[in-house]
């Protein structure tokens, strides 16, 4: 096992870390309590600098301007840019576009790649992924009710979706819908590209989450598909292949998310340690860092973050060596381990900051609101524990 990166990748990571500290983290004030329009201008300026440095969208395939990173490299990149909520956007690798890029690259036709993939990678358009429905359990996509009925050369889509993240302002959605209701459960659904200006595509609302409905990329749309007609040439992959594509999209995506969360955990931990050293708590000049309880929190968190990081890097390394299927156990384990470690780091950092921790004067409260969902999306904790536990126990059955 070897997590070493090439000399070239080390240099890139150093450049990214330095750029994050100098150019991206200082924009957080504008994001937390500034002006959305001005933030957009500042983010666009930072994106221009990233392009000049040759680091734009490095996770994308080489033929689309990316750097063709290995899974370990990709993970280390996600960790470095995950240190700020703005990092992924500034580097052109934000969800849900990054996942859509992967499946368009793997399953898209030449025409689909020209029309949708290229402008997506170039940052000219945004996209969304429309699988989850309010009325069916998202944890089990075999229950999907949205239908895409064949009608001549078209599909006609009907159904209700929600948590179609970033639908607001997106150019197209990749929709998962039932095309073959009579087929075996795993072959009933397909992925279909739906331009958002298609009649019958309606963004009903941006769902308010933790007090904020958000807008644009930072939003979660409820979308109604009402007799939404698209040509069959918009089918992604094969008819009935939706479940396989969804698995493909979610598997490696968990590594990226987990490494991004480790970027968050690392920064929250640093903020906690800095605050503990600065905050005087009695007349002798003792600081919070002098108190044993804070020392224990620092020790536990350091050990937990390191363990979670090694587990995730091992998952990434296993994918590089043996493919995503061979890394199934690691992928399930990191999803719940890292999500909980990151949330514990953010919560503990807030506790050490006291009242300041729940204000928007630091980024901690933003993460507390926005990252709670980490235990739910890309497979809830319980779903991963069940499938991992079942696989482990089966090995001892004979
Ligand atoms: C911030 C955010 C962004 C998202 N973005 C997108 C997106 O862009 N596109 C998209 O399609 N979807 C998106 N989702 C939806 C996400 O994929 C679903 O929320 C997830 O799959 C869970 O489905 P559900 O919410 O219907 O919960 P349910 O399936 O109803 O599950 C509820 C809870 O029940 C428990 N549970 C479920 N199944 C089991 C089981 N088998 N055993 C034991 N316990 C179980 C878990 O604790 C789970 O949290 C997003 C969600 C969030 C919160």
Image (cartoon, rainbow, N blue to C red):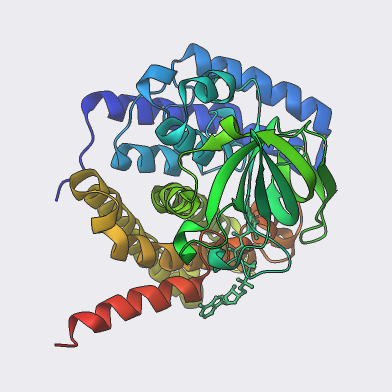
Q: Quadrant of residue 287?
A: bottom right
Q: Which residue appears farthest toward the top when viewing the image?
A: 52
Q: Which residue appears farthest toward the bottom when viewing the image?
A: 397
- The front one of 59 and 326 is 326
Q: Is residue 288 visible?
A: no
Residue 397 in the image: above or below residue 106: below
Q: Which residue appears farthest toward the front when viewing the image?
A: 152
> Ligand 1 shows up in which quadrant of the image?
bottom right
Residue 182 in the image: above or below residue 206: below
Q: In the shown orientation, is residue 304 left or right of residue 85?
A: left
**Tag count in the figure?**
0
Residue 325 in the image: above or below residue 167: below
Spot occupied by residue 52 in the image (x, y as percentages of width and height): 50, 11
- Residue in the image at 58% along x and 52% along y: 179
Q: Is residue 149 visible?
A: yes
- The front one of 245 and 119 is 245
Q: Quadrant of residue 144?
A: bottom right
- Residue in the image at 46% along x and 76% along y: 292
- The front one of 273 and 394 is 394
Q: In the shown orientation, is residue 347 left or right of residue 54?
A: right
Spot occupied by residue 180 in the image (x, y as percentages of width and height): 55, 55
Q: In the shown orientation, is residue 219 left or right of residue 118?
A: right
- Residue in the image at 42% along x and 49% along y: 259
Tell me the quarter of the image containing the C terminus. Answer: bottom left
Spot occupied by residue 231 in the image (x, y as percentages of width and height): 65, 32
- Residue in the image at 41% along x and 25% along y: 15
């Amino acid at each position: 096992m070897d997590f070493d990166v090439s000399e070239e990748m080390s240099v890139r990571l150093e450049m990214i870390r330095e750029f994050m500290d100098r150019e991206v983290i200082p924009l957080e004030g504008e994001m937390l309590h500034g002006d959305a329009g001005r933030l957009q201008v500042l983010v666009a300026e930072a994106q221009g600098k990233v392009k000049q440095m040759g680091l734009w969208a490095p996770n994308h395939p080489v033929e689309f301007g990316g750097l063709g990173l290995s899974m370990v490299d990709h993970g280390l990149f996600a960790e470095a840019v995950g240190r700020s909520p703005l990092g992924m956007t500034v580097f052109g690798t934000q969800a849900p576009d990054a996942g859509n890029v992967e499946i368009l690259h793997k399953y898209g036709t030449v025409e689909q790649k020209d029309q949708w993939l290229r402008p997506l990678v170039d940052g000219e358009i945004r996209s969304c992924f429309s699988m989850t429905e309010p009325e069916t359990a998202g944890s089990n996509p075999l229950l999907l009710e949205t239908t895409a009925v064949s009608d001549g050369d078209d599909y006609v889509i009907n159904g209700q979706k929600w948590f179609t993240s970033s639908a607001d302002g997106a150019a197209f959605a990749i929709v998962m819908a039932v095309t073959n209701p009579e087929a075996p459960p795993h072959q009933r659904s397909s992925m279909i590209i739906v331009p958002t200006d298609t009649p019958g595509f309606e963004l009903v609302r941006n769902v308010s989450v933790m007090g904020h409905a958000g807008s644009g990329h930072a939003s979660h749309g409820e979308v109604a598909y009402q007799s939404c007609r698209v040509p069959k040439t918009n089918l992604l992959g094969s008819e009935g292949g939706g479940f396989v594509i969804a698995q493909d999209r979610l598997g490696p995506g968990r590594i990226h998310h987990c490494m991004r969360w480790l970027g968050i955990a690392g920064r929250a931990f640093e903020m906690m340690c800095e605050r503990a050293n600065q905050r005087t708590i009695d007349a002798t000049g003792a600081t919070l860092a002098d108190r044993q309880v804070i020392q224990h929190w620092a020790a536990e968190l350091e050990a937990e973050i390191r363990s979670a990081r090694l587990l995730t890097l091992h998952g990434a390394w296993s994918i590089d060596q043996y493919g995503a299927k061979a890394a199934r156990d690691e992928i399930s384990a990191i999803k719940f381990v890292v999500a909980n470690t990151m949330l514990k780091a953010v919560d503990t950092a807030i506790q050490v900051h006291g009242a300041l921790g729940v204000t928007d004067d630091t980024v901690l409260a933003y993460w507390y609101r926005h990252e709670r969902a980490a235990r739910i999306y890309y497979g809830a904790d319980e779903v991963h524990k069940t499938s991992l536990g079942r696989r482990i126990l089966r090995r001892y059955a004979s």
